Amino acid sequence: MSTPHRSPRRPALPGPALATLVTVVAVCAGDAVARVFPYGPRHRSVNDLGNQFVPFHAHLWDLLHGRARGGLLLNWQSGYGSSFLPDFGTYLTGPFALLVGLFPRQDIDLAVYVVTVLKTAAAGAAMAWLLRTQRPGPAWAAGLLGASYALCGWSVIEASYNPMWLDGLIAFPLLCLTGEWALRPRRPLAAAVVVALCWTANFYTAYMATLGAVLVLLVRLLLAREGAAQRVRVLARAALTTVLGVALSMPVLLPLFLSSKQAYPGWSKPFEPVTTQDLLARLLPATYSFSSPALFVGTGTLLLAAALPFHRAVPGRERLLWTGLVLLVALSLQWMPTHLAWHLFATPNGSPYRQTFVLAGIVVMAAWAGLAAGPPEPRALAGGAAALAVVLLAASRSPLATPWALGLFGGGLALAGAAWWALRHRRLVLPGAAVLTVVLLAQAAATTAYGQQGKLAGLDDYPVWGAAHAARARALAGAEGWPAYRTDAGRPALTGNDPMLLGGEGGAYYSSHTPDLFTRTLVALGAGWTSRGRNVQSLDNPVTDAVFSVGARLRPDGTIARAEVPPLVTVRPPGPDPVFGPSPFANQELLLGAEVYEDPLSPGVCRAGTEAFLWAPEYNATARLADGPAFRLNGNPPRNRAAMQPMGVSHGPASELVFDRAAPAHWQLSCLDRDLLGAAVARLRATAAVSVRVGSSDVRAVLPPGSTGTAVLSVPAIAGWTCNGRPAAGRLGLIAVPLDGRTTTVNCGFRPPGLVPGLAAAGAALLVLLALMWTGRRRTVPTVRTT
């Protein structure tokens, strides 16, 4: 075994602290150069960051401050009542998410940004810690390599607007650390807890990180000096702590998995590997593409990894194993079977290279394996530089490789080569380290800034909290009447999750867990969607408002429209169970229990005094009544579905329907009679529950004596509801309870499917851990010796 290189003059900062500092400076500098929030006027909240994650963090803020409707099990604010534990486990269970509670609520965008930067920095610190645990080496170099991992292209370009993915960036070095503990062996309880935290924080990227950690552990075992039996024991220890850790996270994971199966099907695109020149181009700084792997890790790190095969101070077996692992993982990104294995055997929606961070971490470990034996000699540096020159030449043929990218890579390669050469001389250690730091900072900041520009050019963006948000929130708060009635944030929406961001208890909901039942129910009633059915929009319609007890609705002009509506629990007369048909107007009447729409006098003309409503789900243009304003319908199947649109009060033939573009193949105009609707609402109110109490995850209603038929809760009948001791029944997508004339109360509670088995699994894992701790004190296990 070679003697580790130790610099006689080290910077004062330890490795994790240096990694944290470099990471924070690079990310903030890049965002400042791009002039995005909070350093400039450009929006940062692109795509799902503004549409999903900021509103979810706002809801977490409300939960932490006791202001949310609902609790950890149920979210009363979204989708007329949605399961919250799966959303919590998908988006909010990372420990850093709790920091949003320290900020004022109106600074929720800043809070999410700070959390994002801190997560990125924590990943760098964790990697620096891991590297020094694997083998001795210069602390400052471990810090720089840790920062290069945290600042990889995947992190600053893709995970920066999917902040829960950054939990996977942190998880990979931590899970590799549990492998190191299994090698020694040490800290079995801590290892299981680390696994549990990683899988709870974000199971999706933790799964990828676990696969990567297994590969790293196999390399470490193959480099061990002991025999097969000892290696098998190490694998058994690692497997046991991993299984126990995953089991500890089951109270969150099992409900999450079951909810995913019940979600509305998402978009699936066949995997197509990128070309070799595009793949190599993403090794360069300052490149952007939504559908190729962001492989950038800093030229200084790449040069070390490329020089490893030629580094004679490193044993040949170690060079072979680490280089082989890098190449195998890189190739696995491009092959369909391994692509599916990395992604839980389902091609993901959107970016198809979400496992890229694992490759970045393995490259960093390979670089450290070489550096820990001493800076590479000139011949090794020349070999590594030649390999990267070939990469540069091939990448230059890709349209992704801009002149800036080529220049930054070439210049960084020359400077990094000179710096690593200088580090072989004691007097040049500090200057060499400074040059490497500057190269990494410049390249990472440029990659961050260029990625921001690419995202803003190609993705939707959403404004940070401002005057418009505050005005809407104040209006909704002033109209609150829950649980006597719901308040809806209305349309047009600022985000897909306005109820969580702004307030109220509306129908809009956007999540990876949007229930299939909810989407299909709302669509049957005429609702619109984006994101191929997982972003269900609020339905601006007085009939559905009556059905869902929406008594106050925010209008586009900032005013509140109020209406007399039935309570959350109503009673419907006995009769056969109705079934939805193709017409959303007829479906609304079925759910209401009364006919309130009229057919037009002619195909495009409603009777004077009635209100015209247009349903044209595939129409993507404006439509209007001839004497009224134009309304935009946003139909673009299968991505977008236009909502039923109120067109205004008809004045007869003068209010003929006009399509401003060619009429769609499928459309329907219907005419609402407000008097009929008022009478239908009065009948429902007369027989409805006399009192309704709503808890964080339950509803209790007292019915009039002698009620028969069916009690209907204006809540989607998603899995997990029980009423009066039995699994809840459904009526046209809503919770229903049969009545026999003797039932006077309805008690319904919600518990996410999988919660109880998940708690049982966690309890069993905890007992096993305690038993292992007890027996571990009575025996000593030999440590595996590694190079």
Image (tube, rainbow, N blue to C red):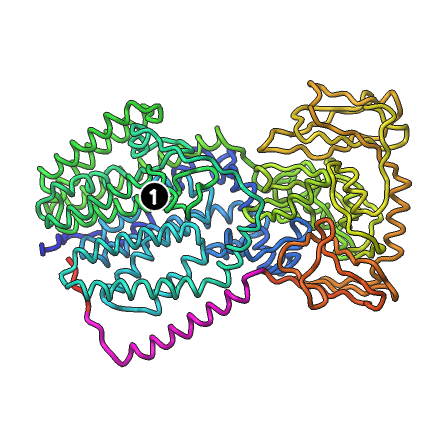
Quarter of the image where one finds residue 460: top right
User: Residue drawn 71% across and 64% down?
Assistant: 723
Circle 1 packing at 10 Å, graded few (<14), some (14-19), many (20+), is: some
Rendered-image quadrant of the C terminus: bottom left
> Where is 732 relative to 745, above or below?
above
- Residue 344 percent location from the top left of the image: 42, 48
User: Visible in this render: residue 619?
Assistant: yes
Q: Residue 569 in magenta? A: no
Decide whether the magenta segment is chiefly helix, strand or loop: helix
User: Amino acid type of disc 1?
Assistant: Thr
Left or right relative to 303: residue 342: right
- Residue 367 percent location from the top left of the image: 21, 45
Left or right relative to 729: residue 345: left
Q: How many marks?
A: 1
Rendered-image quadrant of the N terminus: bottom left
Q: Secondary structure at mark 1?
A: helix
**Which residues, given as a range, are shown in magenta?**
753-782
Nearest the viewer among 602 and 457 is 602
- Residue 307 percent location from the top left of the image: 16, 40
Left or right relative to 396: residue 138: left
Residue position marked by numbered label 1 in the rendering: 338
